[in-house]
Image: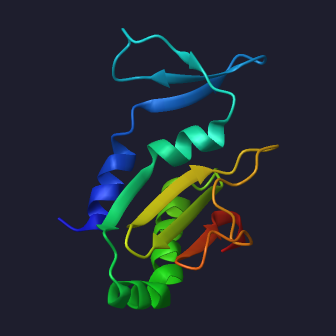
Amino acid sequence: MTIYQSVLIYLANSSFHIISDGTYDYVVNLNCKCLPSIVVADKTAFEATTNHVHLVNRVSRSQYRQIKYCAEAICRLFAYKLKALFPDKVFVVSLTCTRKDSLILRFHQKWEGETLYIQSDCNYGRNTFVSVIETDKI
């Protein structure tokens, strides 16, 4: 099974949903009704930390150089698939790569009034690069 297939299976089997009662936003686990709903103040952070996959751990110097050239293509691939699966929602797909650490793919919905979890114009250090694609811009 490819990483791409694994992430799509994860998406299809996702049991967490964010609902609102007009005052608060709640995270509900639909697969386990015995767990209480929890109030979330930052939907973006909740989704981005829940919806992430470590594609490579302990990224070497040579891997870092190779990944840097294909990062945007990887993000676009997942962004197009999310857009096809959920045409009424806007998603943000981000890829962060830190040398001697991890290559991480994340996605979250683009929530009104909240900033993106990973921003392409931020400086994350000289050994880290990011790629960010928003599905409403492709």
Vertical relation: 14 (above or below) 41: below
Q: Residue furthest right?
A: 113
**On the rendered image, what quadrant is the C terminus found in?**
bottom right
Residue 55 in the figure: left or right of residue 106? left
**On the rendered image, what quadrant is the N terminus found in?**
bottom left
Residue 116's x, y, as percent?
70, 55
Vertical relation: 6 (above or below) 101: above
Query: What residue appears at the point 50 percent right and 22 percent down from the top-left corner?
Result: 28
Residue 61 in the figure: left or right of residue 107? left
Vertical relation: 124 (above or below) 46: below
Residue 102's x, y, as percent?
38, 66
Residue 17's x, y, as percent?
51, 31
Which picture quadrant has residue 35?
A: top left
Along the line of sight, the residue nearer the viewer: 75 or 131: 131
Query: What residue appears at the point 53 percent right and 55 percent down from the top-left corner?
Result: 107
Query: What residue appears at the point 69 percent right and 28 percent down from the top-left corner?
Result: 41
Along the line of sight, the residue nearer the viewer: 115 or 24: 115
Query: What residue appears at the point 49 percent right and 80 percent down from the top-left corner?
Result: 71
Residue 4 in the figure: left or right of residue 64? left
Residue 82's x, y, as percent?
50, 60
Number of marks in the rendered image: 0
Which picture quadrant has residue 31?
A: top left
Along the line of sight, the residue nearer the viewer: 110 or 102: 102
Which picture quadrant has residue 74?
A: bottom left
Q: Specify how the rendered protein is coloured.
A: rainbow
